[in-house]
Structure formats: C-alpha cells, structure tokens
C-alpha cells in the first residue's frame, strides 16, 4: 500500500474528529450570536452524532458491498456541501442541518480506511501492518484532541462560521486524492452486492425513530416525555425483533448476540468516551462562562489531552496487551472524573490542566486497545460493518454525554453542574472495570 493512499485515507479520517471537537469552543460564540441558550446549542453536538449514529452501520455495510473508494468520495462530497451551508444561511436551524449533513458525510472515512487496509492485506496475501493502524489511530486521536485549539484559532480570527467552511477545501482535496490514489485490491468490495441484497429500510427507520425520540426527551423539556419514551421503547423493541429475522439487517443483532467479546468492546467504547466528550464539550463551555476565558484560551487548556493521548498512543501502538491497557485507561478515567467533581472557578489552572491530561491517557489507551480488540474479535468478512458499529458506539457516547450536559447546565455552566458530570464519568469508569472483570476472552488473549 502506497504512502499516497495512506495520506488520502488520513484526510478523511481526521475530518471526523476535527468536526467533532472544534465545535466545542464555538458553542458559546454561536449561542451569544444567535441568541440560543446553552442547552439548545448542544443540538449542534447532538445533530452530528445523531446522524452519525444512524449512518455509521449503513456506511460500514456500503463499504463492504460497494468498495471503500466510491463510498469515501461520496462521503467527502457531502462534507464539502455541508461546509458551505452556514455561509449561505446564518440561522440556527440551517446550522443544525449542516451538522446533520456533516454527520452523514463523515461516517464513511473510518470504516473505509480500515476496510481498505484490511482488504489490501487480505487480497495481496500480506499481514495488516501494525504501523499503518497506529498511524490511523494516532491521527484520529491527535486531531480530536487538537480540534478545540484549531476551533479557537478559527473563531478568534475568522468567526465561528469558519469552523464550517474550512471543511470544503479539505474535503475537496480528499476527493481528488481518492480519485488518483485509492486503487487496487484495497478499494474493492469484500462482499460484492448480489441481486438478493436490499437496503434494510424498516430497520433503518425504526433505529432512527428510537434514538431521535430518546435524544429529544433527554435534551428538551418541551416535548411530551411519556409519549416520546413510549415511541422510543416501542421502536427499539421492534428494531431488535426485525433485525433478528431479516436477511440483510441494518445492524447485525445476531452477530452481537453470539459474539460477546465484540459486543463488550462496543460497550467499553461507549462508556470510555463519556469522559472525553465531557472534557471536550462541558469543560470548554465552563472555562468560557465561569473562568472567563476566550475561545482560543479554552482550546489551549484542552491541549494537554491531545499531547498525552498522542504520547500514549505511540507508546502502546505496538503492544498486544489489550486487557491491561484497558484497565489502566479505566482507572485513569475514574481518577479524572473524581478530580473533575472537585474543580471550581477558584481552582488553579495547573490543577485543571492535570485533570485534562489524565483523560488523555484514557483517550489514548482506550481508543487504541479497543481498536485492537475489534480487529481481534470481528469476523474478517464484515470488518467494514464492524468498524462502522464501533463508530456508532462512540456516537452514542456523545449523545449520552450531551444529555448529561443538558441536565448539568440547564441555563449556564456552573461548578455544581461540572461536579455532577465528574461523578457521571467516574460511574462510567467503574462500569468499564466491571465489564473487564468478567471478560475472560480478553484476559486469555494476552
């Protein structure tokens, strides 16, 4: 596999974490500019992850069925279009729609990259190079962590709209590079479409209804809670029953039921990233509202997470010790959550930086080790779909975190709300440790 192909894949891979995190320091300027409260502005976070959560499993299936190159280019085309919408229309609804479109476009990059690497190795009779996986993981982690700094620079010098239009030239570059460099065995479909394959429209619809109604209940006080909960639960139950019997499921529930190690990997991803998203979206707002920092300074305060995550990723990228790495990640998350529950507006900056850096350890260890677990336990013929589901788990983590933030900061960020979020992160870390304690497959694999 050429370096040009790897560089092309990285363009798509870094766009997703960049858009996930650079919006964090733009939330306050957008809220002030458009006159929306902190709870409502969180829909800019939720909308991207909601569309991502819906589209990720489908993106993985399409990568397996159509091929990584075509799906990769189509996704970047949506990203380029979404970047222009806030420039054309300066309205909160249009911005939310742009984030939804971004979610649909960004989801293809990660499963396409993993499928390209895996298929290239499989069809050329070589071994998947660990260094390539490490580069993809490091690029994703580093970009996610430096996103607030990039966002701070853009907001400070060009305004919050720049966090959107910057996607257009980057996506355009990725499309051109993909047309030239993503060729050969890696670009082909691992499970080419046959005449019997159809899109699972019913499963997709039920899944969308379930998570959309649940998100509305968690984030808005203006919806009829009982009605929306009943709709969400009913759609969720119907989704599970439908997916178990359909021939070409939107999400392979049967695989999840019979592959416990893979399912637990998704569960760990969901719980682990609650800490990352709490720092990214909650602490960044708190720093601007309570500590009086600007967008750039708030972004710089989150930079230690980027540095620590990058260092940890490099150190463990060649290690096969998944279980012990995940234990350390959970312990660091527990410690960081407890520290977060004691931070106040009078806390020295160095103490806040130390807390942020702790989550960098969790971010690096958790992401790399769970990716290795995914490769270890996912069947080779559905690696694209499995990778897509892993991103769905991360998207669900962002949705859950957004709901916790809406509860903690109903009107504006407060010390008490931040303490509540710290306890939530600590609780998630304890659940990860419980999952690891009962995961015999991981311990035996070391």
Image: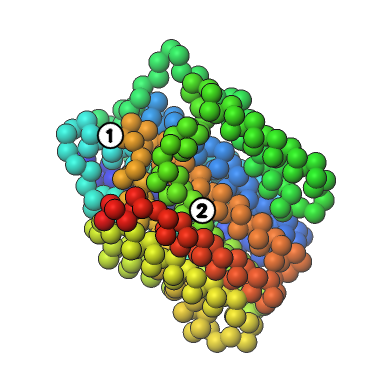
- Which residue reaches farthest top? 195
Task: Name the residue at 51% across, 53% down.
Answer: 270
> Can residue 69 be seen?
no
User: From what the image shows, is residue 151 above or below residue 19?
Assistant: below
Q: Which of these two is toward me, 53 or 428?
A: 428
Point out residue 35 in the picture as x, y percentages from the top left corner: 77, 60
Point out residue 34 in the picture as x, y percentages from the top left corner: 74, 58
On-image quarter of the N terminus: top left
**Element marked by disc 2:** helix
> Can residue 446 be seen?
yes
Residue 119's disc number:
1
Measured in 3D between alpha carbons, the distance from the residue under mark 1 to the one under mark 2, in whole angstroms, is 27 Å
Badges 1 and 2: C-beta atoms under 8 Å apart?
Answer: no
Question: Residue at label 2?
Answer: 270
Point out residue 295 in the picture as x, y percentages from the top left corner: 58, 70
User: From what the image shows, is residue 256 above or below residue 335?
Assistant: above
Point out residue 128 in the picture as x, y percentages from the top left corner: 23, 43
Q: Which of these two is toward me, 313 or 162?
A: 313
Image-based side of 89 in relation to 203, left or right:
right
């Amino acid at each position: 596999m050429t370096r040009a192909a790897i560089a092309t894949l990285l363009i798509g891979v870094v766009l997703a974490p960049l858009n996930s995190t650079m919006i964090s320091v733009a939330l306050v300027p957008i809220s002030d500019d458009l006159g929306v409260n902190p709870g409502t502005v969180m829909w800019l976070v939720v909308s991207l992850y909601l569309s991502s959560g819906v589209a990720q499993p489908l993106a993985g299936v399409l990568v397996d069925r159509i091929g990584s190159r075509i799906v990769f280019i189509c996704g970047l085309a949506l990203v380029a279009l979404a970047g222009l919408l806030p420039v054309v229309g300066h309205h909160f609804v249009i911005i939310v729609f742009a984030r939804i479109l971004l979610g649909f476009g960004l989801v293809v990059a990660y499963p396409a990259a993993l499928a390209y690497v895996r298929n290239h190795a499989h069809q050329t009779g070589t071994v998947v190079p660990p260094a390539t996986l490490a580069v993809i993981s490091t690029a994703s982690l580093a970009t996610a962590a430096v996103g607030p700094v990039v966002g701070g620079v853009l907001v400070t010098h060009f305004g919050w709209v720049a966090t959107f239009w910057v996607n257009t030239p980057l996506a355009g570059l990725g499309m051109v590079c993909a047309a030239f460099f993503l060729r050969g065995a890696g670009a082909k479909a691992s499970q080419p479409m046959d005449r019997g394959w159809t899109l699972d429209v019913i499963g997709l619809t039920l899944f969308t209804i379930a998570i959309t109604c649940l998100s509305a209940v968690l984030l808005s006080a203006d919806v009829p809670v009982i009605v929306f909960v009943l709709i969400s639960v009913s759609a969720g139950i119907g989704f599970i029953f439908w997916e178990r019997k359909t021939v070409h499921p939107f999400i392979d529930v049967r695989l999840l039921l019979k592959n416990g190690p893979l399912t637990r990997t998704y569960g760990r991803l969901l719980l682990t990233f609650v800490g990352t998203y709490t720092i990214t979206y909650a602490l960044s707002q708190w720093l601007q509202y309570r500590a009086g920092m600007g967008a750039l300074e708030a972004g710089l305060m989150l930079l230690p997470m980027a540095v620590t995550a990058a260092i940890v990723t490099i150190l463990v990228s060649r290690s096969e010790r998944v279980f012990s790495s995940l234990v350390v990640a959970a312990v660091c998350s527990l410690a960081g959550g407890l520290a977060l529950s004691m931070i106040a507006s009078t806390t020295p900056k160095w103490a806040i930086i130390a807390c942020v850096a702790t989550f960098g350890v969790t971010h690096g260890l958790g992401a790399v080790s769970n990716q290795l677990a995914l490769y270890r336990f996912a069947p080779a013929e559905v690696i694209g779909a499995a990778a897509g589901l892993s991103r769905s788990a991360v998207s669900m983590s962002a949705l859950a975190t957004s709901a916790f933030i809406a509860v903690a900061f109903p009107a504006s960020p407060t010390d008490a709300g931040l303490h509540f979020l710290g306890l939530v992160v600590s609780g998630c870390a304890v659940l990860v440790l419980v999952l690891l304690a009962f995961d015999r497959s991981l311990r035996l694999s070391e």
